[in-house]
Image (cartoon, rainbow, N blue to C red):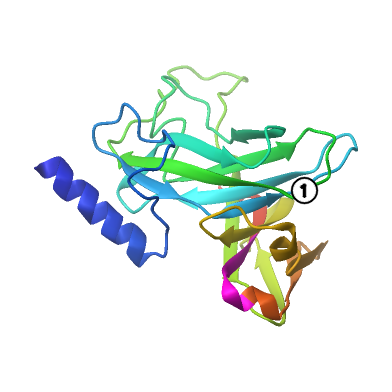
Amino acid sequence: MKAAIAISTAVAAALAAGISTPPAHAATSECRGLLVCVPIAGPWVVVPTGRGVPRPHVEYQMTCPRGYVVGGLDAELTDRAIDVAFVGTTGSPVAPGITTSRTVVFVATHVGSATKTSTFRPHVGCVPATGGGRRTPTAVSAVVPPGKPTTRRVRTVRVGPTVRTIVQACRANERLVDASYARAFFTKRPPSAALVSTVSVTHAVRNGRVTAVVRGDDAVTSVRAIVQLSAVCAGGR
């Protein structure tokens, strides 16, 4: 009973935050083997295609409700040539709360030769946070264990039939070390090439800030389309 109450409470929190939850018949396995788990479905994220080296990739961040951490991951692909990974933190054992936190960043790369529109939909299974963390070193040494030298600052906006400029910056005591953006669509089925073309983004880094010009045409009003702008920041610790 307590588990059922916890799940329903977290689902309500996810809905209040505007996060999508997949239908009960979904074939994804982000909650497989987890006793208490809240499944959260993301939008269809557009994966850039290209034949250069390195291949272009897209990064998309998902967040669990408060009090929960990421305990499981899965994804749906429209192309088997999409390679999906996630950014995890070093530590032992590999487990929720150590390897993952409340947020997780999916990284998708198209490694095939086709140039057709490709998308993926990320899924996370959220489990109650139980604390944990890595062992504190007991000796002073010139060699230190891996930590978290960067912080990801993310801004997600809904796209309308207009031109809009969005900006994401690091905090005053931080410096920008990387930047990216993602286009995504909250649709039941993968978006068509025509739908994907209704949203375009031009982004640039100037004076330590990420600026993106987002354009949506009139057809974008029929769906919920978003752009996520990410700034990876170092320092401030």
Task: Quadrant for residue 210, please give it.
Answer: bottom right
Q: Quadrant of the N terminus?
A: top left
Q: Magenta region's main secondary structure?
A: strand
Rate crowding at label 1 as few (under 14), some (14 to 19) or many (20 or more) other CA atoms within 10 Å: many
Q: Nearer the viewer, residue 233 or 83?
A: 83
Q: Is residue 55 above or below residue 142?
A: below
Q: Position of residue 185 (x, y in %)?
A: 59, 61
Residue placed under numbered mark 1 in the picture? 48
User: Residue 175: horizontal and vertical position, in percent?
Assistant: 70, 54
The residue under the point 66% across, 64% down is 169
Does the magenta run of residues contain 171? Answer: no
* Residue at the limit of the structure toward the left, as seen here: 1
| Number of dots carrying numbers | 1
Give the residues in magenta: 221-228
Of the pair 184 and 104, the residue shown nearer to us? 184
Location of residue 92 with respect to 25 vertically, above or below:
above
Quick check: is 226 in the magenta stretch? yes
- Residue 198 in sight here: yes
Q: Amino acid at mark 1?
A: Pro
Q: Residue at point 74% right, 58% down?
A: 193
**Quarter-wise, where is residue 12 in the image?**
bottom left
**Could you say whether the residue bearing mark 1 is in a helix, strand or loop?**
loop
Q: Is residue 215 left or right of residue 174?
A: right
x%, y% of residue 23? Answer: 36, 50
Q: Is residue 107 above or below residue 232?
A: above
Locate residue 114, reporting x and y percent. Answer: 83, 39
| Position of residue 177 in the picture relative to residue 51 (left or right) | left
Which residue is pictured at 72% across the width and 53% down the height? Answer: 180
Residue 236 in sight in this render: no
**Is residue 113 placed above or below 33 in the rendered structure?**
below
